[in-house]
Amino acid sequence: MKNLFVAFVGLLSFLYLINPTFGVFELLPDNIPLVGNVDEATASMVLLGALRYFGYDLTDLFKRKNAAQVRTN
């Protein structure tokens, strides 16, 4: 049941990010200064968390590699 819930929440956040309503449905309008993009940032965090739950850790793409790791790859 937990897997289904995480998949559903991840799908909702993905749909919110691709914005199929072309800005008609937004939790926070983007033209509000300083807080306008908080909803997109939250949806991104939820999507990354759902992907990590299923074993796709995209945050590894942003880790700095040391010299030993670079030579082995």
Image (spheres, helix red, strand yellow):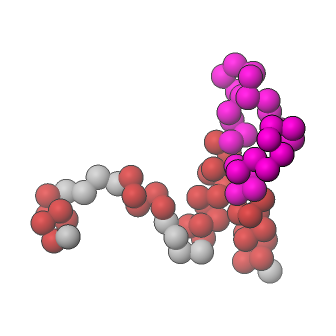
Is residue 15 found left or right of 64 in the rendered image? right
- For this orientation, the residue located farthest to the bottom is 1
* Picture layout, residue 37 above or below residue 70: above
Q: Quadrant of the image for the N terminus?
A: bottom right
Q: Position of residue 60 (x, y in %)?
A: 41, 60
Up-down: is 7 above or below 61? below
Quadrant of the image for the C terminus?
A: bottom left
Residue 17: percent from left, percent from top: 70, 49
- Total labels: the figure holds 0
Location of residue 6 with respect to 27 vertically, above or below: below
Q: Position of residue 72 (x, y in %)?
A: 16, 71
Task: Give the answer, above or below, for where 35 lies relative to 57.
Answer: above
Residue 6 is a magenta residue? no
Left or right of residue 43: residue 73: left
What segment carries the magenta color?
14-40
User: Which residue appears at 48% of the width and 61% of the height?
Assistant: 58
Q: Is residue 15 magenta?
A: yes
Task: Give the residue drawn at x 61%, y 60%.
Answer: 49
Give the residue furthest to the top. Answer: 33
Q: Residue at x 70, y 51 (%)?
A: 18
Asked if residue 52 can be seen in this view, the reply is: yes
| Residue 46 position within the rendered picture, expressed as x and y whole percent measured from the top left | 67, 55
- Lateral position of residue 25 relative to residue 57, left or right: right
Which SS does the magenta portion mostly show? loop
Q: Is residue 13 visible?
A: no
Identified at 12% across, 66% down, the residue is 71
